[in-house]
Image (cartoon, rainbow, N blue to C red):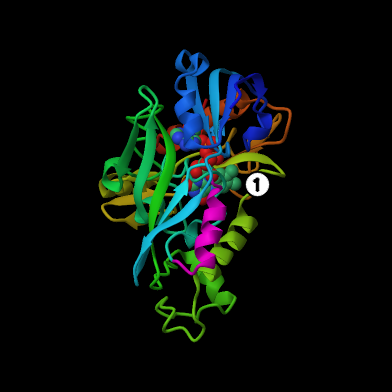
């Protein structure tokens, strides 16, 4: 294990922002990590753990040590007729883990196909897509405490998962390195195809029967986890910009959740505003709020370009970097968008991406 200096982070973040780290190190196994805790470059500097760099915006050089997670390995811990417990090291690529489980026919993470990044970053914001969140199938999270180097296991309930949130992103931010996670997957078919676009895709491609009860047994063709993962991947490719082609970090903003009372007042003023009821709260898609605001009256943020950065033409939640720009430009644009949404709707949107 070698600590490098003045390291270029440009290829290590999907925004493609130019930034350098004062110190940089790659950890390939748990003994690397234990050794790292003894290094003065680690002990005496601010630290940041990096996976695929698909949820970060570098606005400056990092004056500390960046630790790149390359911990590899996937094991089946135990199984019975119904369930299988899979432990994955944090440096594994998330989508590779999805591919591994769907190939085996296990149900649970097929809706999370093609989310970029590493397994170790997945609990940070409780990754979610197409009606499923990591918390739905997570058993535990293994961590190393940064201060002491001690190993600890967080049970699911201790992670305090919320919408794109966890203890690791909030009260314990920067306190732990996530080394591995264990998932509980199902051998019994448990498709979750309640998400409108997913269901429509499966119906129009005749993978499930229209208006069926989503039961793979009721369907004449037996639905497999692979079918769902492929459908999700196909929908994602058609909607989201590929970071290899245009710099981005997926949704830059979180969706908004409000109480029914607040929604009622908003709907009186904005009757076209789309809302989705989720348990006790109501979701407003932030993409709609952004689309209905802009830099000037009559111009929408959607597709707006400002120098080397902008808002994606197909998806208003996604901020993009066309090349040669800076993280500060993206941050400034995000702030303008947030304040215009606040001025019009009185709603304060939050960012999903970690701004460094
Ligand atoms: C095109 C695109 C689509 C996306 N779609 C989705 C989506 O549908 N749903 C969704 O939830 N997200 C989505 N994302 C966001 C992103 O893919 C996820 O948040 C992913 O989990 C980030 O993984 P990463 O390894 O790239 O994390 P990084 O960007 O490297 O890190 C993210 C944060 O986690 C911290 N971190 C990383 N690894 C560790 C570790 N081992 N221990 C402690 N802290 C750590 C970092 O310090 C940083 O604060 C999308 C991103 C892109 C570019």
Task: Establish whether ligand 1 lies closer than 8 Å to the Cβ of label 1.
Answer: no
In the image, 229 versus 106, the foreground residue is 106
Residue for badge 1: 313
**Image location (x, y in percent) of residue 305:** 68, 35
Q: Is residue 292 visible?
A: no
Task: Say whether residue 146 is magenta.
Answer: no
Q: Residues within 10 Å of mark 1 (few under 14, many from 20)?
A: some
The image shows residue 2 at horizontal and vertical percentages of 61, 24
State whether residue 150 is above or below residue 203: above
Q: Is residue 276 above or below residue 80?
A: above
Q: Position of residue 196 (x, y in %)?
A: 47, 65
Q: Is residue 322 left or right of residue 346?
A: right
Per the image, is 100 magenta? yes
Most prominent secondary structure in the magenta stretch?
A: helix
**Residue depicted at 40% across the width and 34% down the height:** 348
The residue located at (52%, 57%) in the rendering is 98
Left or right, 147 with reference to 61 = left
**Count of marks, rendered view:** 1
Q: Residue at x 51, y 65 (%)?
A: 102
Which image quadrant: the N terminus? top right
- Label 1: state its secondary structure: loop
Q: Nearer the viewer, residue 337 or 238?
A: 238
Between 105 and 148, the residue placed more toward the observer is: 148
The magenta region covers: 92-106
């Amino acid at each position: 294990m070698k600590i490098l200096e003045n390291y270029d982070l440009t290829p290590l973040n999907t925004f493609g922002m130019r930034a350098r780290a004062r110190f940089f190190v790659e950890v390939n196994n748990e003994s690397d990590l234990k050794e790292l805790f003894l290094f003065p470059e680690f002990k005496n500097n601010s630290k940041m753990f990096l996976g695929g760099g698909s949820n970060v915006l570098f606005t400056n050089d990092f004056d500390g040590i960046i630790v790149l997670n390359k911990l590899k390995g996937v094991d089946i811990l135990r199984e019975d007729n119904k369930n299988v417990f899979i432990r994955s090291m944090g440096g594994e690529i998330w989508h590779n883990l999805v591919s591994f489980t769907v190939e085996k026919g296990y149900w649970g993470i097929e809706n999370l196909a093609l989310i970029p990044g590493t397994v170790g970053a997945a609990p940070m914001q409780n990754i979610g897509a197409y009606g499923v969140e990591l918390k739905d199938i997570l058993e535990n999270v293994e961590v190393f405490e940064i201060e002491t180097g001690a190993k600890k296991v967080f049970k699911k309930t201790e992670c305090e998962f919320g919408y794109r949130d966890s203890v690791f992103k909030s009260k314990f931010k920067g306190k732990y390195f996530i080394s591995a996670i264990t998932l509980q997957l199902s051998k019994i078919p448990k498709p979750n195809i309640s998400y409108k676009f997913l269901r429509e895709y499966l119906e129009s491609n005749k993978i499930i029967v229209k208006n069926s009860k989503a039961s793979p047994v009721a369907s004449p063709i037996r639905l497999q986890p692979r079918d769902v993962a492929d459908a999700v991947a196909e929908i994602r490719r058609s909607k989201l910009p590929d970071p290899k082609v245009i710099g981005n970090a997926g949704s830059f903003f979180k969706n908004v959740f409000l109480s029914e009372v607040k929604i009622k007042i908003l709907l009186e003023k904005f009757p076209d505003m789309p809302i989705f009821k989720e348990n006790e709260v109501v979701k407003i898609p932030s993409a709609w709020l952004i689309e209905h605001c802009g830099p000037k009256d009559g111009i929408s943020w959607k597709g707006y370009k400002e120098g080397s950065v902008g808002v994606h033409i197909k998806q208003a939640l996604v901020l993009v970097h066309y090349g040669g720009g800076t993280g500060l430009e993206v941050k400034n644009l995000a702030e303008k968008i947030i304040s215009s949404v606040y001025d019009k709707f009185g709603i304060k949107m939050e960012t999903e991406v970690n701004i460094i």
